[in-house]
Image: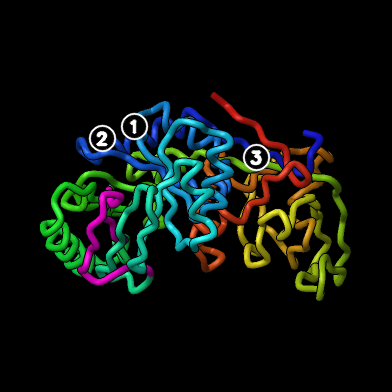
């Protein structure tokens, strides 16, 4: 490895997750959410692989993301989730994007999906769905499918009521948690985001839901040092050795997506769990070693059994945020695609 870190994307795992989610939908279409650069996995790569496995629509957050994806993938349908403004509509029309409408304005000549607010309290109309030959879909979003079954049931019931007054539209409501837990939320399509990448929407082991992690992240030990009693490593002397201590320095930090709040978590050094110590810097972190190791010893940050869900729990956040925060640009990391 010559780069500071290496991000591996396993297309076989992605394909397996697509098949798992399609099976869970029981005949409803699976749409793949590839916003935020495919949750850090690569939107075009994920999108192309998902389409090969039968995914019908790719979902992004903005017209800008949709245009970038269209330049890479000419054929699949692309749905923009976020709000749009009139100056964006011409580009969307020319790129054959589909738009989500949450404010009642209906641009002409573009396939439109009306979003109703059934309880998310975010984007969306009430129950009034405007009629237009451009309106092809009706959608909403589940607020707590990972945590609140009773509220989710009320949202599903509310959406079904609204959809019943507007026959002929493609109905889509379920997110990853909805697909995996609520058959009654299937309707005509489910939109899978986090589960597509083999990350649990419930913050648990993804294997429990038949999902396989797609992303692995590895680096290496760049230098080994011995701290004497009373010596420290990193900013603000957050770690002070209370006895002679070997440490390994890894050239990955919070600018790469390994957040400062991950101090105290474990990474794998040569396959052995080791604790991250001291303050994580912008471009480096330190791990405690029981004995010195060779420079170049591999370090696994995510993968090889080390779950991003566990790191997220330790950091007090969600796996979505950690995955989206990994910088996979060529300037920071080398990308490897398997399968």
Q: Main secondary structure of the magenta part?
A: loop
Kindly state the secondary structure of the residue where label 1 is placed: helix
| Residue 138 shown in magenta | yes
**Which one is in front, 259 or 128?**
128
Figure colour scheme: rainbow
Q: In which quarter of the image is the C terminus?
A: top right
| Residue 283 image-quadrant placement | bottom right
* Mark carried by residue 23: 2
The answer for how far apart the CA atoms under marks 3 and 1 are is 23 Å
| Residue 202 shown in magenta | no
Q: Is residue 87 left or right of residue 169?
A: right
Q: Where is residue 334 in the image (x, y as percent from the top left)?
A: 72, 37
From this viewpoint, which residue is outermost toward the front? 108
Residue placed at 22% from the left, 44% from the top?
188
Instruction: Residue under label 3, please give it.
Output: 7
Q: In this view, does 18 lie to the left or right of 68?
A: left
* Mark carried by residue 19: 1
Question: What residue span does the magenta drawing correspond to?
Answer: 123-141
């Amino acid at each position: 490895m010559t780069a500071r870190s290496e991000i591996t994307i396993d297309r076989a795992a992605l394909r397996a997750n697509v098949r798992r989610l399609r099976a869970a939908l029981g005949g409803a279409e699976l749409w793949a959410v590839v916003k935020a650069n495919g949750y850090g996995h690569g939107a075009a790569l994920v999108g192309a692989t998902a389409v090969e496995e039968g995914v019908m629509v790719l979902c992004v957050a903005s017209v800008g993301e949709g245009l970038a994806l269209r330049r890479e993938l000419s054929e699949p349908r692309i749905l923009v989730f976020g709000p749009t403004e009139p100056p964006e509509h011409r580009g969307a029309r020319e790129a054959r994007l589909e738009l989500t409408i949450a404010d009642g304005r209906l641009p002409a000549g573009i396939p439109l999906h009306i979003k109703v607010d059934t309880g998310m309290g975010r984007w969306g109309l009430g129950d009034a769905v405007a009629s237009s030959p451009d309106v092809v879909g009706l959608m909403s979003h589940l607020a707590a499918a990972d945590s609140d079954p009773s509220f989710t049931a009320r949202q599903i019931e509310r959406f079904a009521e609204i959809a019943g007054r507007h026959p002929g539209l493609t109905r889509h409501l379920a997110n990853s948690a909805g697909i995996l837990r609520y058959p009654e939320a299937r309707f005509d399509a489910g939109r899978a985001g986090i589960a597509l990448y083999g990350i649990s929407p419930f913050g648990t082991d993804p294997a429990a839901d038949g999902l396989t992690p797609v992303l692995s992240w590895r680096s290496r030990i760049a230098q080994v040092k011995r701290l004497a009693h009373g010596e420290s490593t990193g900013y603000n002397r957050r770690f002070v050795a209370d006895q002679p201590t070997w440490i390994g320095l890894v050239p990955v930090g919070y600018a790469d997506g390994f957040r400062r709040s991950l101090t105290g978590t474990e990474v794998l050094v040569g396959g052995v769990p080791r604790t991250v110590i001291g303050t994580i810097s912008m471009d480096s972190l330190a791990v405690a070693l029981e004995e010195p190791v060779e420079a170049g010893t591999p370090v696994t940050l995510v993968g090889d059994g080390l779950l991003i869900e566990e790191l997220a729990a330790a950091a007090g956040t969600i796996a979505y945020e950690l995955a989206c925060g990994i910088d996979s640009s060529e300037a920071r990391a080398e990308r490897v695609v398997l399968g």
